[in-house]
Image (cartoon, rainbow, N blue to C red):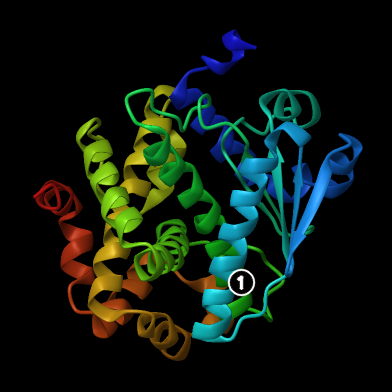
Amino acid sequence: METRMKISYSLIFWIFISFGINAQVSVEHVEERIKSIGLDTIRANNVLVYFDSKDSLRAQEFADLSVSMAEFYKQEIGVNFDFKVATLQSQHWFSEFPGIPYAIPWPYFSDRIIMMPSSLTEGIMIDDKLNRQENRWIVDFVLVHEYGHLLDKDYFRPFDENDYFGVGWFRELIANYFAYAYIQSTDSEWAIGAKELWKNKLLKYTPKKFTLNWTFMNDLAPHELGPTYAWYQFMLNLKAAELYEKHGVEFLRTLKLQLDWQDNKNWNTESLLPILDGISPGFISWSENIENYAKKIDK
């Protein structure tokens, strides 16, 4: 098992992104497959958590976090919640979900299940140089980020049959906004710590391109695709934090009112940026200077 845990970081991200392209085909009967493992369950309000008995503490942490965030957004934007979390050990990822990389969760809309790694000591998100609390911040942020994708669907696009809309960077920015808004409102230590972690991660890699048109990633080799995609996620995390600290939750309400969500299948970066710039001036200059923005936020 240890050998499998050493799979290239960039290769795993490549698998992750490639998997995402065909997600609708690959994620059928997810809950049935989880149930076949024979896991225990706990229910907390409208959240059901699957877990192995030895992971009961981590499962309870996921349950508490899920309920807290769901209740926060029920109060803030009126979205009711009903979803599940699968707390999986590494052997379950490899045996039951081949092709779904360990430690990279995914929101399964058909079953509304968010799959999470149970370990805080192994996996590609774990940094041996960080303490348990810092690694927990990293992993747990992914849970609230994935819930952010569910909120995106439920709040902005309840009429939409598609799980995702096509503008990748904006889709991820919204999920990050939901996630950061929650942690900043409920746990300032986590918010401060997370921002420092993201800034440090940006310093460890420099992509060859700085553009919001993510189609260029389709042409990258696996060893470039993984760290490039990660770099953009960390950058978007920090942009979401910046926007939230300026606008608060009201930004989400404004997006709902001012964007034509019925027409989201026809969106593109060029059409979105002027609208977003009118809502929060600086979007266009940010898009034109992503490299300088990433350097600036180090201070």
Q: Residue at x 22, y 34 (%)?
A: 206
Q: Which residue is drawn at 89% across and 46% down?
A: 32
Residue 93 vertical placement versus 261 (above, below)? above
Residue sitting farthest toward the bottom: 257
Residue sitting farthest toward the top: 3
Disc 1 marks a residue whose amino acid type is Lys
Q: In this view, does 84 lie to the left or right of 230?
A: right
* Circle 1 residues within 10 Å: few <14, some 14–19, many ≥20: some
Q: Is residue 251 left or right of residue 195?
A: right
Residue 89 vertical placement versus 215 (above, below)? above
Q: In this view, does 291 lie to the left or right of 212?
A: left
Query: As rendered, which of 108 and 139 lies closer to the eye?
Result: 139
Q: Residue at x 19, y 35 (%)?
A: 203
Q: Quadrant of residue 103?
A: top right
Dot 1 falls on a residue whose secondary structure is helix
Q: Residue at x 50, y 32 (%)?
A: 13
Residue placed under numbered mark 1 in the picture: 153
Residue 197, image x, y percentages: 28, 42
Query: As rendered, which of 142 and 206 lies closer to the eye?
Result: 142
Position of the N terminus, as image quadrant, is top right
